[in-house]
Amino acid sequence: MSWFGRKQPPVVTDARAGDAAGLAAIHASGFERGWDAHEFERMLADRLTIAHLSRPGGKGAPTGFALSRLVVDEAEILTVAVAPSSRRAGLATLLLQHHLGRLAAAGAHKVFLEVAEDNVAALRLYQRHGFNEIARRQAYYARAKGPPATAIIMELALR
């Protein structure tokens, strides 16, 4: 399914503290331990945080977001998430492209992230955007059911 041709294509904008509850709901739908609205409020209030979200037609509840921390010329993508009803439509690609462009404009030369090795969709997304594996953290992500997952640390040079 693609959002192309729909009446209200996604619009990507800066995320604000008032978006915290919507971001928390999306995050909880995609991760073993979702961050709560208070955690998002704190992150969004931090001057080092850069966050973008998408909304259909620019209105209504968020459908996805990307959130990073930028220190001097290095950024770390803390999370990218898309609501279940908006997955498999290219929204993560749209968000990541916008987000990486804004990180570069803010002065980032390198971007880092961690992703669970069993998160195949995210790995493919990051690899398509030029991220390369630089290290692994064995048994890093705890799982409620099953053994912990290894974290893959990835890096992208923007300049």
Image (spheres, grey):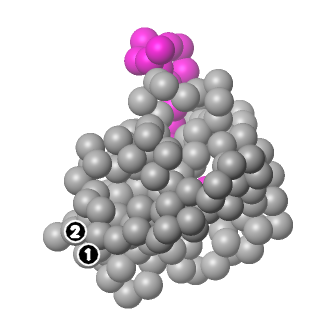
Q: Secondary structure at mark 2?
A: strand
Q: Quadrant of residue 59?
A: top right
Write the residue at 35% across / 71% down. 135
Residue type at mark 1: give it. His
For the C terminus, the quadrant is bottom left
Q: In the rendering, at what x and y percent does residue 71 appear? A: 44, 84
**Is residue 19 at all visible to an observer of this figure?**
no
- Front: mark 1 or 2: 2
- Which residue in the rendered view is the most extreme toward the front? 147
Residue that mark 1 sits on: 109
Which of the pair 127/69 is nearer the observer?
127
How many marks on residues? 2
Magenta highlight: main SS: loop
Q: Is residue 28 above or below residue 91?
A: below
Q: Is residue 75 above or below residue 8?
A: below
Question: Is 59 left or right of 42, judged from the image as shown?
Answer: left
Q: Secondary structure at mark 1?
A: loop
Residue type at mark 2: give it. Ala
Comes first in the chain, label 1 or label 2:
1
- Classify mark 2: residues with Cα within 10 Å, few (<14), some (14-19) or many (20+): some
Q: Which residues are magenta?
A: 1-15
C-alpha distance separating marks 1 and 2: 6 Å
